[in-house]
Each structure stands twice: as structure tokens, then as C-alpha cells.
Amino acid sequence: MLNKLRIYLGDLSYLNIKSNFGNITNPLSVGYIGTYLMLRHGIDIEINIFKDPVKLVDACNNNIPDLIGLSFYTWNTNLNHNIVKFIKNNTKKNIYIVWGGPSVDTNIEEQKSLFKRFPEVDFFVENEGEGGMANIIKSILSKKNIFENPIDGATFKINNEIIKGKSIGLSTDLNLLDSPYLNGLMDPFIKDGLKPTMQTSRLCPYTCSFCVSGKNKGKIRAFDLDLVNEEIKFIAKKYSDKPNRTLCLTDENFGVLDRDVEVATMIKKSSIDYNYPKTVHFYNDKRFTERSRKIVGMLGPMNAYGMTLALQSENPEALKAANRRNITSSQIDDNIKWAVKNNLNATTELIFGLPGETYESFKNVIDRSVQRGFDSVHCNNLYLVDGIEMNRPNYIKENNIGTHFRSVADMAGKITVKNKENEVHDLFCAELQRVVTS
């Protein structure tokens, strides 16, 4: 029997005394990657999924993988980098390293920058990773030189030249994807009690330049409703003894589709039938239509923030720079009245530091938010992350943006690992935020 290609997938997190373990989510993103890889290459591969960086290192000591694929974003960029460097130095083997996720910009110049910063990485996969990862695996299994021809959905570097395949990252057929819960890939993380996440649709129709989703252009796609219903019931049964675990919906605008009312009904029914979930977190559609009212009317009491109208700013210049358009003032007032009538909290989110925003204009939007009757006003400092339009050098230069770096308290710590000789090594990792200060 031929040896199978050994693949380790990870969505790594800091798991230490500073971590709020109950807020650490299960690795759903790489669960979907693993599900798709098994669909395309099942008999030729074996897959293991990791959340704990120490367990990933231990697995590499015991069985060296052929490929490590990591999801990376602002909360684990330096963690990933330190772990990959240690594994490569420790094993001394040619392990293909693939990174993907929100932090991989579609801009080729930004991808060049990633290769400079993370020379240990062989491939970057942009947008949805299923197709790009499957094509990388196909190339490896072919036994040919995988750096000979472009690979669709992936970018690699050879002889200082960046080779980028065709962009396919927003074309995954969700009808082909099984649930990582129903196929067992999430079982170890359910056992560990990590917070469950669900995705019922993909893509955001809005183009905000401060968000990783704003650069994506495509069609909103949704998972089969029967599959979603089975997944909700499965999660509810598994977490019925953990009512403190919030169910997180990762849809970027839950309520943007007509069918989202049916999904909300399923969640509400599950809460009654199985005593889970008792709390749910989701981002409702920014337009907050009548459909959104139906959903928030059902699930709002289970959501700490009730009805959320994420205005971010009301300064016309700042909204233009952010490539964003809000609902009208009369719509805002009408929705707040609706929330009060239905005994729901009314919440808004604001961002200070957007290009064009001033001290006075931001102070005014806070005052207006309070006067309008919002129960909660969340003010967030704008920070630039890999993968957003605002982080591109030309945008920073054109808008004369000044930044400083700050550490993130719960995204740092000492990671104690062992090498193949069982010697202990302490790796200190810390994530930084690039905060807009002028």
C-alpha cells in the first residue's frame, strides 16, 4: 500500500493563563479545508487538525508531515511564524508550508511583501482556501516539480519571481462541502469545550476598505438548508451541557438572504428543544431591512448586543474614504424605536481614526448616538491588518496615515515545546496591532 500524503492543518491560538479559554473558537475554517481535501483526494491523503501549537509540534516530532497548512490573521501571525520556524529547524525535512486566510491580500504587491516577511512559507492561498489547497495537493501528488507551473488559487516564489495562478478563491461550490461537525473533524475540539462556530453563507456584498471582506467581489452563496439544520441540531446536542458557550455565526451579514429567517427559526427551535444555544453572536445585515427585524426579533434576546447598527462614522469624508454608505438618519431613528418597542438593546459600533475623521466630528457622532437612544456605543480604534485595502502602501500614502504599534494583551505568551531529542524550548510570541494615530 502506498504511503498517504500526511497533511497537518492548523488554526492556532494562544492557550495560556491569559487566554479566555471559553472564548477560543473551534477551527472551523481549516475544518472546511480538510473536508474539501478529503472530497478531492480522500484515498491519497491523511489529515490532522490542530488548535494547540504545542500539539502541532509534538505531532511533527512523532510523524513528520508532508505539508502544514495554517490559517493566519491578526490574532496568530507571529505565533504561526515562530512555530513554523521551530518545526523546520527541528525536523530538518522539506515540509511544504502553506498559509491562507483573511490576511492574504489579493494584491500581488502585498503578496510579495508576505514572502519577504515569512520566507519559510512556500505558498500563500488567497480568499476561500478550498480550491487553492486542493490544487497544491494535486500538484504534489503528481510527483512533478510543483514549482514548474502556476497553481490556480495559490501563489509561490521561485528564483525571486512571484508566480501567481488564476484567482479562484470565491468560487467554492458549497453544495459539495460536507459539515466538519457531521463528518467528525470537529469532535476533538467539541470534547475540549471550545466555542462552536457556524457558517451558513459566504461573501459580503459591501466594500468597506477597513475590512478584509471589502476587497472581495463575487456572488453570495449559501449552504444547503437541510445541512444547516442538521448541523444546528448536532451542535445543540453536543453543547447542551455547556450552555455558557455562545454559538457564533460567521456569516458576514446574517440577514442579507431571505432564507436567513429560516435559519434563525431553526436556531430558536433548537434553543427550545435542546436547551442550546442560550446565547448567540452574529453580525446582522448592515442595511437592517424588514428581514433583519424578523431575525433580530427572534434571536435578539439571545444576543447581548440586541440590535446592532454598525455606523462606524457619520462623517461624509470618512465614509467616502472607507468606501461605505450608511442607512439614513430617519432609518436609524426608526430602527431604534423598533428596538425599544420590542425590549431589545440598541447598539452601534464606531471607528475612530478613519481618514477624514477629526476629533470634533467623532465627538459629534458619539453625542448624536447617545441622543438618538443607543443603549451601547462601542468605540474601536482603527488598526491596519494584512489583507485590507487600507493597509496597502499607496492607500496609506494618499491619505497621509500615521500609525504606531501596540501589543495585544491576550495574544502573547510563552509557548513551551520540545524538539525531537525531547529538549525543552521556550518560544515567546506576541501579536501586534498597527494602530492609526494620525
Image: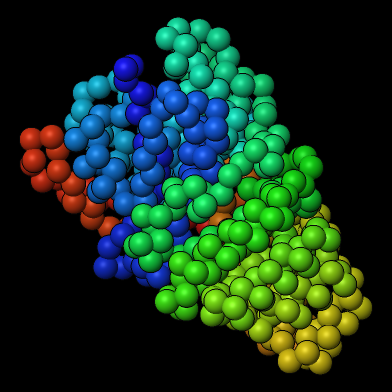
| Image quadrant occupied by the C terminus | bottom right
> In the image, what residue occupies the spot 50% across and 53% down?
181
Question: Where does residue 52 sit, x and y in percent of width and height?
Answer: 32, 52
| Image quadrant occupied by the N terminus | top left
> In the image, what residue occupies the spot 25% across and 29% down?
64
In the rendered image of this protein, does residue 256 appear above or below residue 364? above
Question: Where does residue 325 sit, x and y in percent of width and height?
Answer: 83, 59
- What's the image's color scheme? rainbow
Residue in front for this viewpoint, 201 or 266? 266
> In the image, what residue occupies the spot 21% across and 42% down?
58
In the rendered image of this protein, does residue 169 appear above or below residue 215? above
**Residue 320 placement: quadrant:** bottom right
Q: Is residue 317 visible?
A: no
Q: Is residue 220 visible?
A: yes
> In the image, what residue occupies the spot 53% across and 69% down?
236
Residue in front for this viewpoint, 398 or 410? 410
Question: Where does residue 318 sit, x and y in percent of width and height?
Answer: 76, 59
**Residue 48 placement: quadrant:** top left
